[in-house]
Amino acid sequence: MRAILQSLWVRKLIGKPAFLTIADCESEARRIQFQAAAFSSKASRIQSDLDALARLTASAMALFSSGDNRACTRTALTLDFGSFGLPIFGFINTLCMTQITVDLRYFAYYSKSTIKNDMANNLPTEKKVLAVAMLAEGSSIRSIERITGVHRDTIMRLGIRVGEACVKIHDEKMRGLTCKQIEVDEIWGFVGAKRKNAPRVGAYGDVWTFVGLDADTKVIPSFVVGKRDTYHARAFMDDLAGRMANRIQVSTDALAAYPDAFERSFGAGSDYGQIVKTYSVTNLNQAASGRYSPADVVQVERTVISGMPDVSRICTSHVESQNLTLRMHCRRLTRLTNAFSKKFENFQAAVALNFAYYNFCKTHSSLRMTPAMAAGVEKSIWTVGELVERCGA
C-alpha cells in the first residue's frame, strides 16, 4: 500500500517517486517545507488541484519521503490552530518529532528542527567551492551539473544562497570609501522575457543594473538592480553617496534621470559631468559578421552639469569595460542565449555573486591585486572557498 501511495502521490507532489531522489543534494520532498507563519505560494499553486483526501495522503507521503535518516534534533510537538489550519496527525520517530498540518487553502506543511544550513549539507565543501567558482566565471548551471555531478536544482539553490549573502557582505564592506572619480553606467538584461513579450507571458521583462566604478582602484562600491527609471536612479545615487567618505567627481551618460538623482543625493555643488558618444549608423540589413560588430564612435561631447569637475576626466570608458567583464562572468547576461534568468530574485543573486567575486577574489590585471585591496577595504585576496565560508554556505 505504501509503495502504491509513493508512486501516485509523491510523484504528484514532487514530480518523481521518493526513491528516485538524488543522494548528493537536498531531498526533493523537502521542497514542501513551510514555516508555521509563512506559506509558499509556489507550493500552493502546485497543490491547488488536490482535494481534501489527496492533501491528507500527500501529507503522509511527505513525511515518509522526507529523509528522516539525516541528523536532526528532538523538538517538542506543537499544534497550530490558526484561522485556516487544521491539525491532522503527528508522527514521532527515534530522531525527532514531526508535525503534519493540512491547510484548506495552502495544502500542508511540516516543521522539523534540523542542523544549520540544511540545504546542501550532503554536498562536500570542495564541490560547493567548485560550483560557486564556475558560476562566478560564467559557466551555465547545466554545464556545472555535467562537470561536478551535482544536481542543477542544488546548484541553483546554492547560487541563490551565496548571492543573497554576498549582498550583505558588499553592504558591510563597502563603507567609508575614499574614491575620487566614480563612473556610472547601466547594463541591460531581462528576466523571463524581453519587454515586448513580457506583458503577454507575465514576466518581469527588461532589467537594468546600475553600476558605479572607481576609475583609479576599479572597485565597484555600489550597484542597484531594477528598471531604468527615475526611482531606481535615485536609489542608486543615494546608495552611492552613503558609501563615500569624501567629495567625489561623478561621470554618467545622458540618461535624463541622473541630474535630479545626483543633486538629491550629493547636493547642488558637487562635481558632476555627462559624456555623450555619437556612433555611426549601422546597416541592419548587412551580413551578421558586420551586424554584430561595434559601431564606430564619431563624436564625443562632455558637459559639466554641476560643480567644477575635471572635464578631461569626464569618462565612462572604465565602467563600460567592466560591463563587458560582467557579461563574460555572469552567464545570465550573455547575449543570444537561453541562459537568461526566469526569476528576478535569481538575477539579483547572480549579479551580487559576480560583483563580490570581482571585488574580493579576482585579481585585476592592471592593478595586480583585487579592487578591494586597491581601495583599502581588504588586505589580502579572498579565495572562493573563503567567500563561500563567509557566506555561510
Image (spheres, helix red, strand yellow):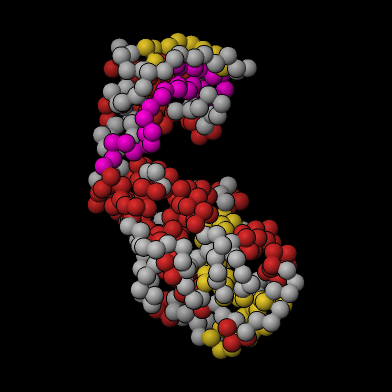
Between 162 and 76, the residue placed more toward the observer is: 76
User: Is residue 112 on the magenta stretch?
Assistant: yes
Mark count: 0
Q: Does the magenta stretch include residue 342?
A: no
- In the displayed structure, would residue 198 be above or below residue 377? above
Rendering coords of residue 195 (x, y %): 58, 58
Q: Is residue 327 visible?
A: no
Q: Measured from the top left, where is residue 327 in percent x and y?
A: 43, 65
In this rendering, position of residue 346 left or right of residue 72: right
From the viewer's side, name the closer residue of 372 and 91: 372
Question: Which image quadrant: the C terminus?
Answer: top left
Drawn side of residue 224 relative to residue 157, left or right: right
Residue 134 position within the rendered picture, expressed as x and y whole percent measured from the top left: 32, 56
Q: Considering the image in quadrants, where does the N terminus appear?
A: top left
Residue at 69% across, 82% down: 308
Q: Where is residue 198 in the image (x, y as percent from the top left)?
A: 57, 53
**Of 110 and 313, the residue lying toward us:** 313
In the image, is residue 284 above or below residue 102? below
Query: Start and end of the magenta stretch?
Result: 99-124
Apparent side of residue 256 relative to residue 17 in the rendered image (left or right): right
Q: Is residue 315 visible?
A: yes
User: Going 32% across and 17% down the picture, which residue do you hit?
Assistant: 95
Say which quarter of the image contains residue 152. top left
**Which residue is most to the right?**
268
The residue lying at 37 percent from left, 12 percent from top is 92
For image coordinates 38% across by 77% down, the residue present is 366
